[in-house]
Amino acid sequence: MPSPPTLAPDVTALAHRHWTVAEVALLSVPDDTDVELLEGVLTMTRKPHWAHQGVAGEVYGLLWLWSKQSGAGRAFFEIGVVLAEDTALSPDVVWISAARVAAVLHSDGKLHGAPDLVIEVLSSGAESSQRDREAKREVYARAGVQEYWIVDRFAQTIEVYRHTDVGPLTLALTATTASTLTSPLLPGLVCRVAEVFA
């Protein structure tokens, strides 16, 4: 039996083919590589910079502790999220309400369905930033994500997108290091933005 195809780590996108989640599952991918599938387009990047991971870890820790104390839901760090047969993403942090965890968390260790909250930490590069700000935001909005945070470790801001009368996942506010971030989705959570980037 032939070995599964291996993707070279220097390839960033294979845009000439429409992939499915099932096909991507058969690929052999180097350990230092993250693979995401967004509406059939396969993108591969190296594991994030330590500063990226540090910021994501701060946000995850905050959500994890609040969730444990409140019992309101569960936070996950870099978990696979399958949204369609051609879309499987790996957000930095997600949060799911307690009422929805059992329905969305499957035995394969991935979430099959939209988290309530998705948090992406921006990596360097205009292409990566545009992907998080536009393409992923549109997909998350269609999937039913209630709130989307884009954490910009370079500008040290957190952009919060929510469903509004204007449309799904519209920019509601940009929190700076002088701000304390709260959310109607997460009652009682207090995020001191400066601490995320400390």
Image (cartoon, rainbow, N blue to C red):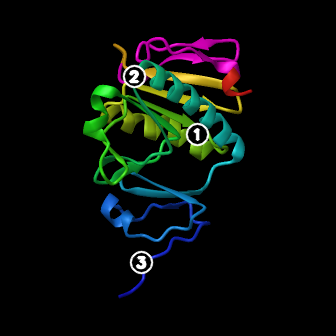
Q: Residue at x 56, y 23 (%)?
A: 159
Image coords of residue 42 (percent x, y): 44, 58
Task: Give the secondary structure at mark 2.
Answer: loop
Relative to 124, say whether 187 is above or below: above
Q: Earlier in the sequence, mark 2 or mark 3?
A: 3
Q: Residue at x 37, y 39 (%)?
A: 139
Of circles 2 and 3, the one toward us is 2
Q: Residue furthest bottom?
A: 1
Task: Give the secondary structure at mark 3.
Answer: loop
Quadrant containing the N terminus in the rendered view? bottom left
Residue pointed to by mark 3? 4
Relative to 195, say whether 20 is above or below: below
- Specify the amino acid type for callout 2: Gly
Could you give the CA–CA distance between mark 2 and mark 3, rounded to whole angstroms? 42 Å
Q: Which residues are magenta?
A: 167-194
Quadrant containing the C terminus in the rendered view? top right
Image coords of residue 172 (percent x, y): 48, 16
Task: Give the secondary structure at mark 1.
Answer: helix
Residue 130, quarter of the rendered image: top right
Of circles 3 and 1, the one toward us is 3
Category of crowding for the residue at label 1, using alpha-carbon neighbours closer than 10 angstroms: few (below 14), some (14–19), many (at least 20) = some
Is-magenta flag for residue 182? yes
Q: In this view of the protein, which residue sits in the foreground, 66 or 167?
A: 66
Category of crowding for the residue at label 2, using alpha-carbon neighbours closer than 10 angstroms: few (below 14), some (14–19), many (at least 20) = few
Q: Earlier in the sequence, mark 2 or mark 1?
A: 2
Which numbered disc covers residue 71?
2
Residue 42: tell me if it is visible: yes
